């Protein structure tokens, strides 16, 4: 097992694991994780892995995150390296860990943009075919996780409501990491050109 840092793609919220790092990001859980040791598995075997998250007394309040990445390494890798004529493929699996340290945090989000998207996925203010998707970009300016939600209403030129929906309407609600953005895309209906 390895503790890896990750970052958001600032679009979908997909985590991007960071390769071997010389320095850790300020929100890394690396120093919090205790008790990770190698786990030996026989073919077809599974085991529960226990570890501890231990928050230092001097940790600042706010969001911390990382990924526990488990790398499959063949048991005979040392022998294979000596011989030099074997190839081994390994698999990785990661589990994201989000930790919120209690205390005085800053919770602040900002809507960066609201766009209607045409058939080609491009935004605009004039469409020859009614747009079917909205894209709302929200930035987390705070130091804790944000799970924004709310009702969006779509009105026609006369101000009459033609459609409404709830943004980030998932269970659980999607997070926005501190100091990152996320674009929430949703289908819109009843819009005429």
Image (tube, rainbow, N blue to C red):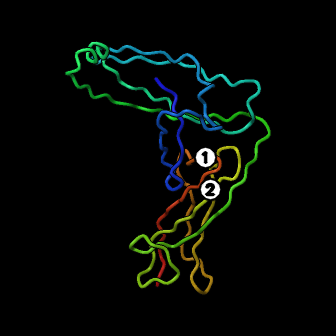
Label 1: which secondary element:
loop
Q: Is 42 displayed left or right of 71 in the figure?
A: left
Q: Which residue is drawn at 22% across and 15% down?
A: 83
- Marks 2 and 1, Cα distance to the nearest angstrom? 15 Å
The residue depicted at 23 percent of the width and 25 percent of the height is 87
Q: Which residue is drawn at 57% across and 59% down?
A: 167
Q: Which of 126 and 150 is in front in this view?
A: 126
Q: Which of 131 and 33 is in front in this view?
A: 33
Instruction: Please give the name of the residue rendered at 48% of the width and 48% of the height, measured from the top-left corner.
Output: 14
Residue 38 image-quadrant placement: top left
Q: SS of the residue at dot 2?
A: loop
Q: Which residue is tagged 1?
A: 177
Which sits in the foreground, 42 or 129? Answer: 42
Q: How crowded is mark 1: few (under 14 residues within 10 Å), some or many (20 or more)?
A: many
- Please determine whether, in this image, residue 19 is positioned above or below residue 9: above
Residue 27 location (% of width, % of height): 64, 37
Query: Which marked residue is nearer to the observer: mark 2 or mark 1?
Result: 1
Quarter of the image for residue 10 reads bottom right
Q: Position of residue 134 (x, y in %)?
A: 51, 68
Left or right: where 17 falls relative to 26: left
* Residue 174 drawn at (x, y percent): 55, 48
Asked if residue 48 lies left or right of residue 107, the reply is left
- Residue 50: numbered disc: none
Q: Which of 127 and 61 is in front in this view?
A: 61
Residue lying at the far left of the rendered structure: 85
Can you identify the residue that label 2 sits on?
A: 149
The residue carrying pointer 2 sits among few (fewer than 14), some (14 to 19) or many (20 or more) residues within 10 Å by Cα, namely few
Measured as percent of width and height from the top left, residue 151 is found at 62, 63
Q: Which of marks 2 and 1 is nearer the N terminus?
A: 2
């Amino acid at each position: 097992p390895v503790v890896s840092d990750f970052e958001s793609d600032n679009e979908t919220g997909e985590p991007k694991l960071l390769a071997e790092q010389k320095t850790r990001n300020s929100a890394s859980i690396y120093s919090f994780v205790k008790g990770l040791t190698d786990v030996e598995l026989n073919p077809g075997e599974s085991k529960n892995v226990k570890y501890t998250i231990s928050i230092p007394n001097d940790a600042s309040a706010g969001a911390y995150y990382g990924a526990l990445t488990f790398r499959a390494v063949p048991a005979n890798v040392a022998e294979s390296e000596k011989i030099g004529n074997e190839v081994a493929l390994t698999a990785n699996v990661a589990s994201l860990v989000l930790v919120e340290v209690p205390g005085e945090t800053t919770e602040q989000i900002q809507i960066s943009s609201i766009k209607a998207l045409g058939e080609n996925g491009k935004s605009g203010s004039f469409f020859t075919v009614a747009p079917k998707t909205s894209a709302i970009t929200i930035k987390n300016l705070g130091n804790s996780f944000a799970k924004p939600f709310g009702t969006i209403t779509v009105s026609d030129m006369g101000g009459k409501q033609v459609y409404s929906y709830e943004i980030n309407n998932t269970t659980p609600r999607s997070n926005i990491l501190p100091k990152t953005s996320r674009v929430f895309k949703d289908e819109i209906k009843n819009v005429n050109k």
